[in-house]
Image (spheres, rainbow, N blue to C red):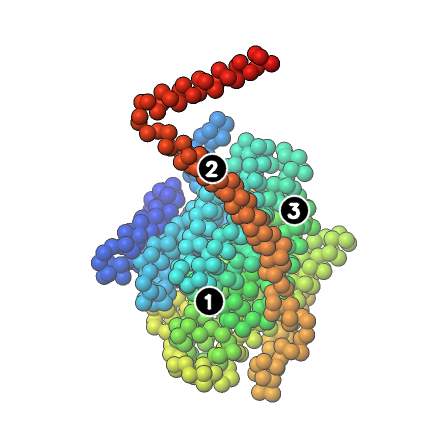
Amino acid sequence: MTIRSVLNNLPGAEALCWGLPLALLVGTILAGIAAFHSDVRVRRWAHWPVLLAIAVALSLSLVLAWELTQRTGPVLVVQGYTFLGVSDFQVRWGLYIDSLAAVMLMLVNGIGLLVAIYSVGYMEEDEGYGRYFAVLGLFLFSMSLLVLVDNYFLVYVFWEGVGLCSYLLIGHWYERPAASQAARKAFVVNRIGDTAFFLGLVLLWYHLGSLRYGSVFYLVGQIAPEWITIICLLLFGGACAKSAQFPLHIWLPDAMEGPTPVSALIHAATMVTAGVYLIARSSLMFALSSLASGAVLITGTITALLGAIVAVTQYDLKRVLAYSTISQLGIMFMGLGVLSLAPELAASAAAAVLFHLVSHGLFKALLFLTAGNIMHSTGGLIDMRMLGGLRNQLPYTHVGFVIGGLALAAIPPCAGFYSKDAVLALFPQISGPEKRMIASVFGALFIFIGALTAFYISRAYLLTFWGEARSQAEGHASPHESPWVMLIPVMILALGSVLAGIILEPTGYFRAYIHLSEPFGKPMVSESEHGEGMWIISSVLLAMAGIGIAFWLYAVPRHPIGEVPTRWGILYTLGANKFFIEEIYQLMAVRPIEMLAWLAGWLDRIIDGLVDFVGWLIWWIGRGLRPMQNGQVQFYALAIILALAIFSLVLISRWGG
């Protein structure tokens, strides 16, 4: 029996589509029950329902991807039922599976499974072991449905679900003030973007009367251009917060306070990929607004450059990787922003960006998990100035980090080389003298960012794995390699970081597989006539130069670790202080709000004082009148007679006057 015959005999596509989120939901519920069970042994087995559920979800993702290749239509739509209806506003459960959704599902559940397996070893001694896996399952459930659903309203619902789970996972160690504060920061910053996203959906429904993909993509051309721009900018606002784009990127580095497997999952496959997915899904809409897609291009460029510069100056290994993620996400937004110069490249841009999203998910998860191995083996040490010399003590982790670093630096034959250059190759395809000049500027910045990337990841590698073993010199225990349950996911990701590009790119199959809508057709696979070869060669040469400079500065003994940054002057100061963006937020947002809160507090005290004074005054009046209520009839009679006498005297005096 062949694999094809087995696949052809599987249950219908509709059952498979509903089975994927159902498996994750059941696994999450069972893990939640185990997490709060009174028996400690049951709580320690909470990972099994989640692992099995993710494995089922990944298998169904692969089958759905195969199913799409066997269908004549590019989209598989599964109808559901109306669960919310208010007047003309109807929300119907439905699933929308195309090549974009299929690839995202494989990425989310593939990386999710490896991270979950790794977590079994990493979180072994954690008191919240069961709670961690229950939230992890809910995270993947929310992200999978965000990708699967067929309308923007349900995307928003599960968008919020992903945000909630990220809050819970970042703040998993809530007893630590830093982790609790980081979780709140992520939650608050994302509320800004979510508000913009919601307003965009309100305007979209107001103009079209529907939020279903099919209706929106078919009718969006009927909206006035200025309203399309506003809607796209609001959607982009939501994507900026979720995918940590400038200036809403400030939450992502602080998210490192959560467990390292959480960082790997957020950075590689879930939280931050949601914003990229939203723009890619809406690229047909963005192609109609050069202003909105131009904002995507400019914001992505600023973010990519800022993230790379800051990563060069950091000594916390996880924060280097965090700013690297910010920079790489900026590169993805640069690719999607190409639509401002060439709307006809909508499908090609989405395919190239999704390709880089997949390869980035592989090598960034690999880098974070190797960082987790380092922390696990050194008792939580992550400052690169206190590491060094780990290549002999952690041989498997060392190899994994090398492969991940080369992929991030876009060195062939790693996957990052193929995927990053697929995005770079979009710029030479832009025609027209003025547009080509603009594209050349952004392409040059793209290549420069790549050189910075190669430099900072080489710097991190040298400080961590070469030189003297500074951790032991500081009195820490001798590092040791992690258990196999943590090494196997690292090895699989390392293999994927090498083979993904080799398998997918030369055939052009991946980019031919991705398509968004018939008006734009499928992406262009052959681009040789545009002269991308020189761009790609320049990119590789500058990346190699970045690696060489890092080795010259950090691998040569005559350059001590603390001496190198002093040569960079103000640029290093800006990078090391994150361009003072946090301080600007404090000055322009936090302090004014604190001042308003202080004034409101004083106003509240004044109002409370007035209310208390009225109550106090009435109490004293009552206390003065209390002796009159003595229960003696003769006293009451005397009071009445006196009152009548006074009243009579008043009347006589008025009449007499």
Cα separation, mark 2 vs mark 3, equals 62 Å
For the residues carrying marks 2 and 1, which lies nearer the camera in this image?
A: 2
Secondary structure at badge 3 equals helix
Cα separation, mark 3 vs mark 1, equals 33 Å
Query: Which residue occupies 44% across, 54% down?
Result: 167
> Relative to the observer, which residue lies in front, 476 or 541?
476
- Near mark 2 (Cα within 10 A), the count class, few <14, some 14-19 or many ≥20, is few
- Measured as percent of width and height from the top left, residue 253 is found at 52, 62
Position of 268 relative to 484 (above/below): above
Tag 2: amino acid: Leu
The answer to the question of whether label 2 and label 1 lie on touching residues, with beta carbons closer than 8 A, is no
Position of 638 relative to 282 (above/below): above
From the image, tell me which residue sits under label 3. 292
- Measured as percent of width and height from the top left, residue 548 is found at 61, 78
> Relative to the observer, which residue lies in front, 331 or 182?
182
Query: Which residue occupies 36% across, 58% down?
Result: 132
- Please indicate, yes or no, whether residue 619 appears anywhere in the rendered image: yes
Along the polypeptide, which appears first: circle 2 or circle 3? 3
Q: How many marks?
A: 3
Which numbered dot is residue 368? 1
> Which residue occupies the extreme bottom position in the image?
558
Which numbered dot is residue 617? 2
Secondary structure at badge 1 equals helix
Query: Which residue occupies 63% across, 64% down?
Result: 579
Query: Which residue occupies 57% across, 40% down?
Result: 200
The answer to the question of whether label 3 and label 1 lie on touching residues, with beta carbons closer than 8 A, is no
Position of 382 relative to 33 (above/below): below
Describe residue 324's horizontal placement relative to residue 53 as left or right: right
Cα separation, mark 2 vs mark 1, equals 66 Å
